[in-house]
């Protein structure tokens, strides 16, 4: 699993207007913090995937 920046969301939400609306709703009046590290959940998911095979 890789980090996906907002600019890459159009690969999942293929309608650009829909994608822009989703990002807008999620980020409205919020603060985006980039820590430069993986999240705990991402690390656990990767570890589980490695154990599974």
Image (tube, grey):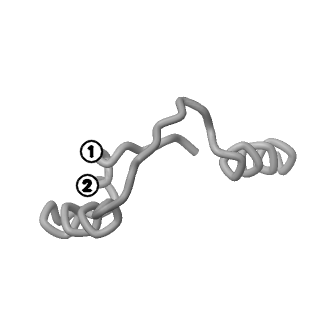
Element at badge 2? helix
User: Where residue 47 appears, x then y in whole percent?
Assistant: 80, 43
Which label sits in the foreground, 1 or 2? 1
Tell me what residue is drawn at x 28 percent, y 69 percent. 25
Relative placement, left or right, of 9 versus 40 is left
Q: CA distance from mark 1 to mark 2?
A: 7 Å
Disc number placed over residue 15 in the picture, else none: none
How many numbered markers are drawn? 2
Q: Counting other residues with Cα less than 10 Å from the Cα at mark 2, is it few (<14), some (14-19), or many (20 or more)? A: some
Q: Quadrant of residue 17?
A: bottom left
Residue placed farthest to the left in the image?
17
Query: Dividing the image into 4 quarters, which one contains the C terminus?
Result: top right
The quadrant in which residue 39 appears is top right
Going by the image, does 27 lie left or right of 24? right
Residue furthest right as drawn: 51
Mark 1 element type? helix
Q: Residue at x 53, y 34 (%)?
A: 35
Give the quarter of the figure containing the N terminus. top right
Q: Is residue 18 left or right of residue 30?
A: left
Depth order, front residue of 32/9: 32
Packing grade of label 1 (10 A; few <14, some 14-19, many >=20) is few
- Between 22 and 10, which is closer to the camera in this rendering? 22
Q: Residue at x 62, y 38 (%)?
A: 38
Residue 32 in percent (x, y) is at 40, 47
Residue assigned mark 2: 10
Q: Residue at x 71, y 47 (%)?
A: 40
Mark 1 and mark 2 in contact? Answer it, CB < 8 Å: yes
**Residue at the spot of label 1:** 7
């Amino acid at each position: 699993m890789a980090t996906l920046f907002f600019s890459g969301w159009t690969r999942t939400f293929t309608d650009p207007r829909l994608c822009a609306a989703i990002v807008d709703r999620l980020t409205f009046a919020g603060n985006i913090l980039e820590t430069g590290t993986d999240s705990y959940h991402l690390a656990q998911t990767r570890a589980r995937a490695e154990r599974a095979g």
